[in-house]
Image (cartoon, rainbow, N blue to C red):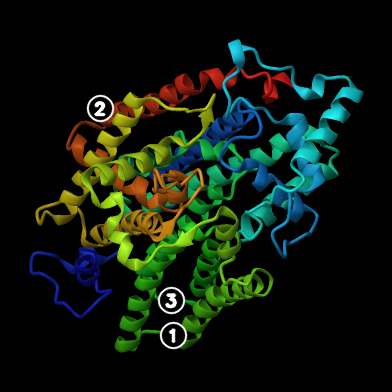
């Protein structure tokens, strides 16, 4: 399907234009910056981005430290980068990190409170009792290895600089920890803004979609946005790549575009390796585009070299660092060793339960629910609601099918360039899902609690967040197709109802967490 779209817009082959399509259809529609409707849409996207940032700050403040999504390991790594310490091997948690865990951490995520009683927050204890608690905790966890130390450096460098900024202003303790979380508000602001740009580039004459895409991102109830975690940067960096690829579709590869695209590709690699399948999809498109341009004599050798150099050199530098210090080009081998995973023989892969109907449904449904809502536990149970999960499952599968049908239907109102962009987005979604499926069948997890031999599935939707902007474009396009030719007022009312459901269900599900004596509001 994707190959057909790429052929149609001239990325692959020299297929003649169908008689029913005018060459004008292939010209990108230019947005006039002085057009009041364009200015109004951009102002609305700015409002949505600010609302998204406020949404993140409020929920980040409401959640106590430290959640079950490895937040303690990520904080330790951020603090190392804040001090200019790039890890060279796996090491135990630093004493400063252990002190934060002892003083500001709660057990409410993993253990139900007996009789509903929560112990007094440690920072409210007398100084002598607090110090004894810290020393005992540090001794108890002195050998706990931080298996995240080989993670790519981009998020931790930026978050570390953000931490240093607040430390320079005299902020310490729990207020500092929460301000590190608030860094995510900047990332989500960027997601919304980039989502708006992508929607305008693909659907410049559809005001509903130009607002629906950033609005859905702004109100997405993904709990990883409220935690110290490198997943939050993945949608931003790949969103940058996505927009630059759309830009390349509209113009030739200039040196300026080549430099930005190369750096964007490198930033995806340097953020998190769960985005590698997205790099593969983008790399395949770029290789075909360069080959086509070279064959037609339209390629610039200097621009092509700039693209390859700006993308490849940072990647090669980090891979070299990992090989020298972690004996692995990606640094993942050391983490896998600590977790106790081993590679399964290829002949045993097909025995995996993912190849059964029940296993496939479980894998897809679990990843979809955690992609939308996250995977926070509270009192040993995952924060969620079966009815809300079902709603997201129905909406997502329905809207994506509607978008796919619109792409395949010859009489669809979608222009060829729009079909190509949607086809690329479908390829991104498929690649990420296939990558998690491959990881699920590739390893024997032994005694690891997650994934485990009993449930050998990667079901962490946050690992798919790199595809957020392409996914939301597909989702919003399906919503647009469902609403058909309804009046604009009705369409925006339907969107508002969906956003209200997203925010209302999130507040309802997380309400008990808001009452925790360990959060920002009780410092």
Chain-order first, disc 1 or disc 2: 1
Q: 329 or 425, which is in the foreground? A: 329
Q: Are marks 1 and 3 in contact (CB under 8 Å)?
A: yes
Label 1's element?
loop
Tell me the residue at 40%/68% (across/down): 280
Residue linked to disc 1: 300
Q: 508 or 294, which is in the foreground? A: 508
Tell me the residue at 16%/77% (across/down): 15
Label 2's element?
helix
Q: CA distance from mark 1 to mark 2?
A: 48 Å
Residue linked to disc 2: 490
Left or right of 132 in this view: 203: left
Residue linked to disc 3: 253
Chain-order first, disc 1 or disc 3: 3
Q: Residues within 10 Å of mark 3 (few under 14, many from 20)?
A: many
Tell me the residue at 26%/62% (across/down): 420
Picture quadrant where residue 12 is located? bottom left
Quarter in which the C terminus is drawn: top right
Tell me the residue at 78%/48% (across/down): 94
């Amino acid at each position: 399907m994707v190959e057909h779209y790429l052929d149609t817009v001239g990325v692959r082959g020299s297929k003649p234009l169908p008689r029913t399509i005018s060459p004008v259809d292939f010209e990108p529609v230019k947005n006039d910056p002085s057009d009041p409707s364009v200015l109004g849409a951009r102002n609305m996207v700015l409002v949505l981005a600010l609302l998204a940032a406020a949404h993140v700050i409020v929920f980040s403040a409401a959640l106590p430290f430290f959640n079950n999504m490895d937040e303690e390991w990520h904080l330790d790594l951020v603090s190392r980068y804040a001090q200019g310490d790039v890890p060279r091997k796996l090491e135990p948690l630093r004493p400063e990190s252990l002190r934060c865990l002892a003083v500001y951490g709660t057990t409410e995520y993993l253990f139900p409170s007996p009789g509903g009683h929560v112990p007094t927050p440690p920072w409210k204890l007398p100084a002598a009792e607090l110090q004894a608690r810290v020393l005992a905790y540090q001794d108890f966890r002195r050998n706990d290895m931080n298996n995240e130390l080989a993670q790519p450096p981009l998020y931790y460098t930026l978050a570390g600089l953000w931490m240093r900024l607040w430390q320079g202003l005299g902020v310490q303790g729990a207020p500092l920890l929460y301000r590190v979380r608030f860094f995510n508000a900047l990332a989500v602001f960027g997601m919304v803004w980039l989502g708006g740009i992508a929607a305008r580039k693909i659907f410049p004459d559809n005001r509903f979609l130009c607002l629906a895409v950033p609005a859905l991102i702004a109100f997405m109830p993904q709990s990883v946005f409220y935690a110290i975690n490198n997943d939050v940067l993945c949608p931003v960096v790949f969103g940058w790549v996505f927009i630059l690829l759309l830009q390349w579709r509209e113009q030739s590869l200039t040196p300026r575009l080549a430099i930005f695209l190369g750096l964007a590709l490198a930033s995806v690699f340097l953020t998190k390796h769960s985005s590698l399948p997205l790099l593969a999809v983008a790399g395949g498109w770029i290789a075909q585009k360069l080959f086509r341009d070279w064959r037609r004599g339209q390629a610039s050798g200097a621009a092509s070299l700039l693209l390859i150099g700006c993308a490849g050199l940072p990647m090669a530098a980090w891979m070299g660092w990992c090989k020298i210090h972690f004996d692995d080009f990606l640094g993942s081998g050391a983490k896998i060793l600590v977790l106790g995973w081993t590679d399964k023989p290829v002949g045993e892969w097909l025995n995996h339960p993912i190849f059964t109907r029940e296993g496939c449904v479980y894998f897809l449904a679990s990843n979809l629910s955690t992609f939308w809502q996250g995977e926070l536990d509270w009192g040993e149970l995952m924060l969620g609601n079966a009815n809300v999960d079902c709603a997201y499952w129905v909406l997502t599968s329905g809207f994506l099918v509607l978008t796919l049908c619109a792409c395949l239907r010859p009489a669809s109102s979608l222009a060829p360039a729009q079909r190509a962009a949607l086809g690329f987005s479908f390829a991104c979604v498929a690649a990420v899902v296939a990558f998690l499926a491959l990881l699920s069948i590739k390893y024997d997890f032994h005694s690891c609690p997650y994934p485990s031999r009993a449930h050998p599935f990667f079901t962490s939707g946050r690992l798919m967040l790199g595809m957020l902007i392409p996914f939301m474009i597909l989702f919003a396009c399906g919503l647009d197709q469902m609403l058909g030719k309804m009046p604009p007022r009705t369409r925006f009312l339907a969107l508002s109802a969906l956003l209200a459901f997203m925010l209302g269900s999130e507040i309802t599900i997380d309400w008990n967490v808001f009452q925790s004596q360990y959060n920002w509001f009780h410092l």
